Image: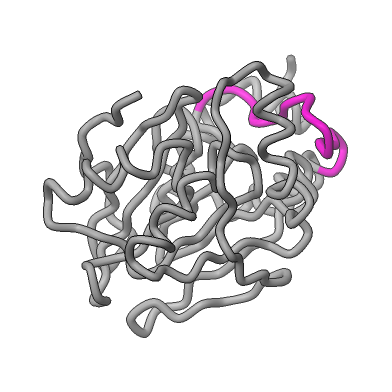
Amino acid sequence: MAGDEAHVVGNWGGGAVWRVTSGSFPSNAYFCEADVPGGGVLVDPGLDGAAIDAALGAHGLRPHQVFCTHGHFDHTAGASWFQTRYGCEVFLHEADARTMKSSNFLLMALRIPEKVTLADVTYVGDDATVDVAGEPLRFRAAPGHTPGSCVLEFGNAWFTGDSLYRHGLGLSQLPGSDEETLRASLLRLWPELTADRGVYPGHGESGDGATVRTENRQLGAFLGLVAS
């Protein structure tokens, strides 16, 4: 399936944030402009790396590094494309190694007729930071959707994968999900959802933290902060 065109959807504080949605199981990939070779870094390369690459290439962009919020195939499968084509180092929380290695099994279980090649991953731990042009990109541990799910914090942007959406809940009933763990993770992050915090989820629209707090009533009810 061909990917959408790349669109600017925000700014992390040091450059534009672009979004490309692609794959037979569509998810959001984000490109953060930065002063690195290729023009920036990529977050959550979805199921169709070639389509994402083409969409970004139309704007003269290619990733220097790849970062994954968690190990599910719709957030990691395209990483091998960018690693092979551009030599990108790929980062993922160590607790999601098993999740990523189960990608082809999960695709088969969901009856999605695709098979992915896994990237050679650099695994990181809680609160690990990776330097991107002098700015730290931080892995904020947010387990619950998967054991190694993280919110990737880069400047004032949060890339939240399937842990936190602008609308609705990010919890799925896939193996490795745990509702109580996710609730605890989101309650820890809740005070930092402010108007100047950009929230860029793995599916759906982006928004600011204040909008998520005030408009996502399903999430508020899940956290016990508003009446259901």
Query: Residue 142: where, in percent of width, then height?
Result: 71, 52
- 93 left or right, relative to 181: left
- 160 left or right, relative to 163: left
Picture residue at 67% right of the left edge, 36% below the top: 104
- Was residue 127 drawn as part of the magenta stretch in this picture? no
Picture residue at 30% right of the left edge, 38% below the top: 51
Q: What stretch is highlighted in magenta?
A: 167-181
Question: In the rendered image of this protein, does residue 217 appear above or below residue 140?
Answer: above
- 76 left or right, relative to 187: left
Picture residue at 58% right of the left edge, 65% below the top: 120
Magenta stretch, main secondary structure, is loop
Residue found farthest to the bottom: 134
Question: In the rendered image of this protein, does residue 8 appear above or below residue 83?
Answer: above
> On the rendered image, what quadrant is the N terminus found in?
top left
Query: Residue 135: where, in percent of width, then height?
Result: 39, 79
Question: In the rendered image of this protein, does residue 51 appear above or below residue 25?
Answer: below
- Was residue 168 drawn as part of the magenta stretch in this picture? yes
Residue found farthest to the left: 59
> On the rendered image, what quadrant is the C terminus found in?
top right
Which quadrant of the structure image shows residue 145? top right
